[in-house]
Image: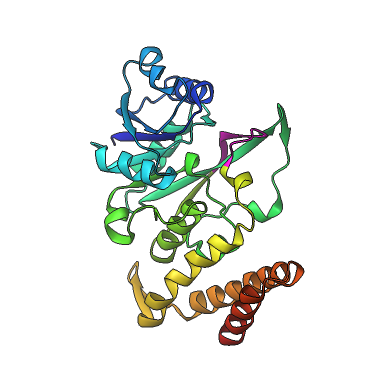
Amino acid sequence: MNISVVIPTYNRYDFLKRALASVYTQTHLPDEVIVIDDGSTDKTSEIQKDFPQIIYIYQKNAGVSSARNLGIKNAKYEWIAFLDSDDTWDEDKLKKQIEFHTNNPEIFMSYTAEKWIRDDKEVKIPKKFQKHGGHIFTHCLSHCIIAPSSSILHKSLFDSVGVFDESLEVCEDYDLWIRIALKYEIALINEPLITKYAGHADQLSFKFWGMDRFRVLALEKLLPDMYAHTVYFFEGKFQSEALELEALKAMLVQKYKLLLKGALKYDKIADIKEYEEKIKIYE
């Protein structure tokens, strides 16, 4: 099982060094490591001196989705492991996922539990990010429960559902995971094999207000295909998509109502009308 690691980065030279150090101390080393520099203006290009074995690719700033997609395009191997440049891996992360997929060749994606560090202290992970394995589509609708840095997936999934949506400034990972989860089983390695660090100012989750706006866009994109296909075939059994469709519509209504509250608070007339009309359609 050959692994390509894809690391997108932007102006995170020091964090990137930490991330790469965690890659090269793995008990099972990857076959290649691709760093996509998304237009950095700091010392990021010097990372090649620190880690001459990496594949370093520079592109003009186009966002994390574009960077990850470029990494996928340049990856030589069939399995892709993502790592965000401000995260790190436990030394057995790749080993344990490779062991799982070797023993379960019918599963094309897995992810792991995680540990959160904020201002150098471990913090409790909110219940809404609880991890699930298997047919997890309905568990993925509220929030993004899969950290990109925890994931390993086979390239064939991109042929099936597409790559990261470059039109989404954030929640691009949420968007891809729900597309995969709708069609495929996703395994959980229920051990905290990655560490996510919070508290630095350039985190995308802190940059944009109203993250549900982007989740709504991702959910709305799924509706046409879900309406068009009422049944799909999986593991030898026909399963109705009706439950998934109803769960998606219910989640849309929930998020529309939350966004409507914000629109009412700030007297955004156009948004108020839009969300009121959408609630009537799906409720």
Q: How many marks?
A: 0
Coordinates of residue 113 in the picture (x, y in percent) = 57, 42
Q: Residue at the location (40% across, 13% down)?
A: 50
Residue sitting farthest toward the bottom = 280
Question: In the picture, which quadrant includes the N terminus?
Answer: top left
Coordinates of residue 61 in the picture (x, y in percent) = 40, 39
- Say above or below: 208 vs 93: below
Q: Residue at the location (47% across, 81% down)?
A: 242
Quick check: is 250 in the magenta stretch? no
- In the picture, measured across the screen, residue 227 lies left or right of residue 258, that is left
- Say above or below: 44 vs 203: above
Residue sitting farthest toward the top = 49
Coordinates of residue 134 in the picture (x, y in percent) = 48, 58
- In the picture, measured across the screen, residue 224 lies left or right of residue 90, that is left
Residue sitting farthest toward the left = 76
Instruction: Name the foreground residue: 264 vs 30.
Output: 264
The secondary structure making up most of the magenta span is strand
In this view of the protein, can residue 178 be seen by the observer? Answer: yes
Q: Which residues are magenta?
A: 190-203
Q: Please, which colouring scheme is shown?
A: rainbow
Q: Residue at the location (46% across, 56% down)?
A: 168
Specify the quadrant of the image occupied by residue 124.
top right
Specify the quadrant of the image occupied by residue 28.
top left
Residue sitting farthest toward the right = 265
Quick check: is 191 in the magenta stretch? yes
Coordinates of residue 180 in the picture (x, y in percent) = 40, 59
